[in-house]
Image (tube, grey):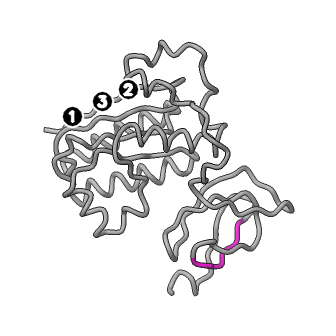
Amino acid sequence: MFFINHTDIGEGSAAIIETDGPLNSDSAPDFDDYISKLINNNIIHLLIDMKNLSFISSEGIGATLMIQKSINEKNGLVVFFNINNEIASLFKLLGFDTLFTIAADRADALHILDKHIELFPGTIMPPISDTSDISDAFPSEEKSVFSEFEESEPELFPVIEDTANTLEPFVIECVKCRSLIRVKESGDQLCPYCSAEFTVTDEKKAVFKIKEIHS
């Protein structure tokens, strides 16, 4: 059987998800429905603990891809952590280790969440002065989800910036190299990883040239 539950953290825009059992054709619909309800309740930062996930099928991987897409559209974040060797090897074989955000453990996942919040501060409530609401969720050394990092910390995604046509920052995936890029302006641009050419519209849509899609 497959079990899933979650714990809200911070002001409720983020949650730690715990899974137990196989994520397959039988459980994938329930998993997708559970996560969709969280997203509908404005929980757009998900730290998914896969420690007790015993197996994942193609249907399960499809469900995780759909979750990733839904969260990315809201400038949210999905972090998978505590992945066992078998599933980690499968993700690497399929190339999902570059598409998904993967952390070693919960502390690492929280660290990644902190950095993401710095990039997209409007996607989560400001720090709370009283941490009693989350004291039961983490050991004392991990209570502050909103701790500050040094200015020298590298950003998660490279920033493409041009002051001419500034947009609300959002993240796209390069169709050529599958890297994640943070975009802030409309117009013609290049992927900083592979130099693939694409155009960003005022509606925040990235259109890659046909030669990049088929190269």
Q: Is residue 73 above or below residue 201?
A: above
Q: Position of residue 194 (x, y in %)?
A: 57, 78
Task: Say which residue appears at 63% left-offset and 42% top-offset.
Answer: 150
Position of the N terminus, as image quadrant, is top left
Task: Say which residue appears at 58% left-offset and 47% top-offset.
Answer: 75
Report how far apart the C-alphas of labels 1 and 2 lie in the structure.
14 Å
Judged left or right of residue 70, residue 169 is right
Judged left or right of residue 53, residue 194 is right
- Residue 3: numbered disc: 1
Q: Which residue is mark 2?
A: 7
Mark in the foreground, 1 or 2: 2
Q: Residue 198 lies in magenta, yes or no?
A: yes
Q: Position of residue 157 (x, y in %)?
A: 59, 58
- Residue 5: numbered disc: 3
User: Viewer-proximal residue, 29 or 81?
Assistant: 81
> Label 3 is placed on what type of residue?
Asn
